[in-house]
Image (cartoon, rainbow, N blue to C red):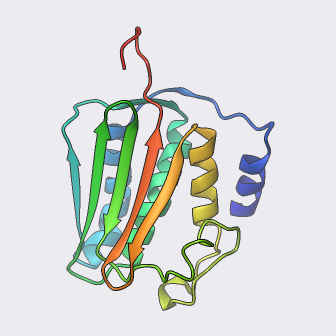
Amino acid sequence: GDLLLLSKMQNPDFMIQKEPVNLLQVFEDIIRSAGAIAQKKNIRIDVNTEEEVVMILGDYDRLRQMFIVILDNAIKFSEDNKAVHINISKSDKIKVSIRDEGVGIDPADIDNIFEKFYKSNLRQNASGTGLGLAIAKQIALKHEGTIEVKSTPGIGSEFIFTFPPYEMNGNA
């Protein structure tokens, strides 16, 4: 299923159905979904935003899927009793940061993590397909967004998304 989805997303002719979406609702939804996994490891999920509404023109289900890939990884690669920090801000662009206090990504791997079938040799990746981050990147691109990663082994990783703001009635 993941491979078929990735193939569809990489097709330049594939268009996603976009509508106004409140990113804060997307995050409420995924935190509910990921909460049980986080609870098993006693990982706290902190959400920080000064906004009450952060609108984006997008596909709710695809945005949910993209962010849950990153949040699941943040939890999976964190040790017990740590935290995952989600920061959502809006200025000329919408910025979403998901930062963990996990094992980090080896600098030798960082340029390859968004490649199809790429998996690190970490035990946490044993059951992964190597498609999640490739799919997340394609979803970001289909939303005219970007995704970048900063990571320090032993300290953690941060995935940063930027998107154009949704213009409602001429207001950002």
Quarter in which the N terminus is drawn:
bottom right
Q: Position of residue 160 (x, y in %)?
A: 42, 54
Q: Position of residue 7 (x, y in %)?
A: 78, 54
Can residue 26 be seen here?
no
Name the residue rendered at 64%, 51% in the picture.
138
| Quadrant assignment, res 33 | bottom left
Left or right of 85 in this view: 96: right
Q: Quadrant of the C terminus?
A: top left
Q: In which quadrant of the rendered view does residue 78 lie?
A: bottom left
Where does the image place residue 4, in percent across and percent down from the top left?
76, 57
Say above or below: 100 vs 120. above
Percent coordinates x, y for residue 101 in the rendering: 28, 75
Residue 148 visible in the displayed image: yes
Q: Residue extending furthest top?
A: 169
Q: Nearer the viewer, residue 129 or 144?
A: 144
Direction from residue 42 to residue 55 in the image, left or right: right
The residue that appears at 32% across and 32% down in the rendered structure is 91
